[in-house]
Image (cartoon, rainbow, N blue to C red):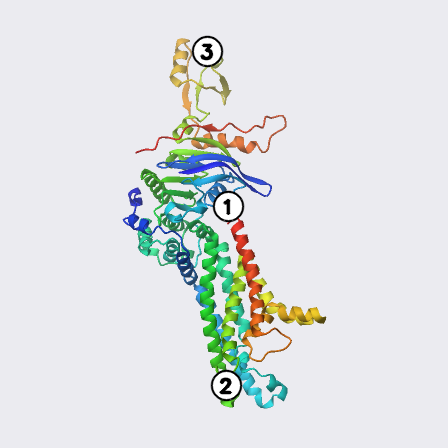
């Protein structure tokens, strides 16, 4: 290898033709390549699909099995759609971890310095990351929700207690399950942007989405009820239920509240990424 | 062309870069020299817009790099070869970089060939040696065929063959008229690679000189002489206004050549047992320069603690 090999490439002219620079679609393409060129992405998405559908099947099988012994009260509250999507509790974590990694892996590997050198417009990088990741988590989330729904109804339809997409509120709940997955992914992305470290951001996501929400029930009085109602997944998961519980927010209001839970930290995190030294 | 003007960068109470000004002209390799922790990497990060300066500016082609329209076609930079996701293949890593600036995938294969890495293109970066990582990083800098290139300690951890390769590579880039700015804490390496030197210590400019001037200006260029009539010889030299000192049994003379000392001894019929020119090694010249900047922060009582005067000469002519 000699110094002559550094000669300007035959494509130097071609480069000039492409001189549009680092436009948003180009940066999105780059982020797509980054996302799917590491094995952890495929594994995490596989874990999301398998855990959500698998757990849903297990819940439906169990409910169906116990049906003859169930009380009238249980039967009244029975929601065949939300039962089939019981696995969302785990699925939301898988997608949140992936969302965290989209940002934190850049910081933990140092790759962020290459990224921000090749595209100095940091807002464009963050926008591209968010758009690509939203698209991926929406598609995977919707596919998983519909998969879990159909797989679960197999058990119930034999007994005639299953739901079909044409029933009132069912389509909204199944699509809502997919939306909930995507929103949980963005929650993880927001935590990653805010905290930059994988361990810290994953811990925050697990705590805020899975651990703390049920604990809010121990809070007393009217303000305690309000905290329960508005807390992350307590609000967000309403969109995946057909049978609404009057103590909780309505489906779309709940989902809107859940979105605020990630939009605010995401905006603040993006502002911090712009200001901080990389 | 890189222009750094009054650049200051403070991390909390630490002043990493202190009012630094210099130019990096095209067509030559400019070495950025200083001991570890002198502020070289910080300066490079500020030039690339990764760190915000506390005050001052760093311009590439007359504007801050953060506003570059087509970043990779303007600047190629390798700060740390390990700044990559180890789970990605070499090709995927370069492809993602290329796509972000609309550079065709065929160029990825070209730069892989340029650094001789076609055979390992599909292997994951995790298993790469430091030398391979450096080559991958260099391939990345060349994707956009940029006119300005920055390399931070590119020869660290390389074997002699790799060092030679990078040295020739950088000289080749400069010969094509590109601006090449390369940092190192090794004076000996810079002496072989760089045409011009920007030397800093403790974040301050110590010297902005051509490499040739820097080497010639080493203040420990002196003649040593051993003679049975050493005291008389010293007196004769002092009579001519020449400073002498006795070191390790030798008479050490500055500002005079071996020939002149020999002639003077012959004229006085002194016997000479040994006479030679002692040149400071480049490392010594470098350490002598930077030691002052280090000592500035730990003065002994009663000592003058002013910063050293920067040695500034004009940048060498750009070779045609």
Could you tell me if the residues under marks 2 and 3 are in contact, i.e. CB atoms within 8 Å?
A: no
Q: Is residue B195 above or below residue B111?
A: above
Q: Which residue is mark 1?
A: B51
Which mark sits nearer the N-terminus, 1 or 3? 1
Give residue A234's quadrant in the image.
Answer: bottom right
Q: Residue at x 39, y 45 (%)?
A: B75
Q: Position of residue B157 (x, y in %)?
A: 42, 45
Q: Position of residue A47 (x, y in %)?
A: 48, 70
Closest to the observer: A244 or A232? A244
Q: In which chain is the residue bearing label 1?
A: B
Q: Is residue A64 above or below residue A216?
A: below
Labels 2 and 1 in the same subunit: no
Whether residue A198 is visible here, answered yes or no, is no
Q: Position of residue A133 (x, y in %)?
A: 46, 63
Tell me the tag on residue B240: 3
Q: Is residue B177 above or below residue B300?
A: below
């Amino acid at each position: 290898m000699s110094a002559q090999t550094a000669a300007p490439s035959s494509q130097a002219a071609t480069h000039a033709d492409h001189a549009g620079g680092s436009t948003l679609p180009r940066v999105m393409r780059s982020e797509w390549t980054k996302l799917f060129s590491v094995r952890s992405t495929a594994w995490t998405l596989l874990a999301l699909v398998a855990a959500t559908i698998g757990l849903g099947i297990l819940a439906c099988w169990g409910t169906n099995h116990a049906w003859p012994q169930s009380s009238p009260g249980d039967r009244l509250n029975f929601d065949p759609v939300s039962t089939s999507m019981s696995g969302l509790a785990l699925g939301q974590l898988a997608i949140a971890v992936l969302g965290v990694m989209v940002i934190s892996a850049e910081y933990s590997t140092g790759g962020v310095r290459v990224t921000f050198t090749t595209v100095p417009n940091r807002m464009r990088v963050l926008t591209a990351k968010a758009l690509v990741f939203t698209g991926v988590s929406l598609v995977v989330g919707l596919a998983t929700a519909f998969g879990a729904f159909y797989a679960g109804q197999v058990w119930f339809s034999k007994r005639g207690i299953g739901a079909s997409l044409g029933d009132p509120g069912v389509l909204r709940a199944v699509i809502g399950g997919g939306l909930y997955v995507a929103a949980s992914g963005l929650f993880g992305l927001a935590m990653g942007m805010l905290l930059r470290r994988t361990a810290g951001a994953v811990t925050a996501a697990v705590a805020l989405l899975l651990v703390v929400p049920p604990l809010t029930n121990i809070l007393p009085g009217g303000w305690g009820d309000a905290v329960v109602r508005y807390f992350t997944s307590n609000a967000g998961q309403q969109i995946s239920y057909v049978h609404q519980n009057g103590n909780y927010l309505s489906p779309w209001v709940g989902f809107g509240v859940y979105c605020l839970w990630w939009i605010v930290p995401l905006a603040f995190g993006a502002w911090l990424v712009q200001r901080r030294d990389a | 062309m890189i222009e750094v003007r009054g650049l200051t960068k403070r991390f909390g109470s630490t002043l990493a870069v202190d009012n630094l000004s210099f130019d990096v002209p095209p067509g030559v390799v400019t070495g950025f020299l200083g001991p570890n922790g002198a502020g070289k990497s910080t300066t490079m990060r500020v030039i690339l817009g990764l760190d915000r300066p506390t005050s001052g500016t760093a311009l590439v082609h007359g504007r801050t790099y953060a506003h570059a329209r087509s970043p990779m076609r303007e600047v190629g930079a390798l700060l740390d070869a390990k700044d990559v996701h180890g789970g990605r293949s070499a090709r995927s890593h370069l492809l993602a970089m290329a796509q972000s600036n609309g550079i065709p995938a065929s160029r990825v294969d070209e730069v892989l060939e340029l650094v001789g890495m076609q055979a390992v293109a599909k292997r994951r970066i995790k298993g790469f040696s430091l030398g391979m990582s450096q080559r991958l990083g260099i391939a990345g800098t060349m994707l956009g065929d940029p006119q300005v290139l920055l390399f931070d300690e590119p020869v660290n951890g390389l074997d002699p063959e790799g060092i030679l390769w990078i040295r020739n590579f950088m000289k080749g880039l400069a010969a094509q008229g590109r601006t090449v700015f390369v940092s190192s804490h090794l004076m000996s390496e810079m002496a072989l690679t760089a045409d011009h030197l920007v030397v800093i210590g403790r974040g301050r400019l110590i010297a902005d000189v051509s490499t040739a001037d820097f080497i010639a200006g080493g203040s420990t260029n002196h003649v040593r002489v051993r003679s049975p009539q050493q005291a008389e010889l010293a007196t004769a030299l002092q009579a001519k206004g020449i400073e002498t000192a006795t070191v390790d049994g030798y008479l050490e003379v500055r500002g005079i050549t071996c020939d002149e000392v020999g002639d003077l001894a012959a004229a006085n019929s002194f016997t000479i047992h040994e006479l030679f020119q002692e040149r400071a090694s480049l490392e010594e010249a470098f350490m002598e320069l930077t030691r002052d900047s280090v000592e500035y922060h730990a003065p002994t009582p009663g000592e003058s603690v002013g910063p050293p005067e920067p040695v500034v000469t004009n940048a060498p002519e750009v070779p045609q």
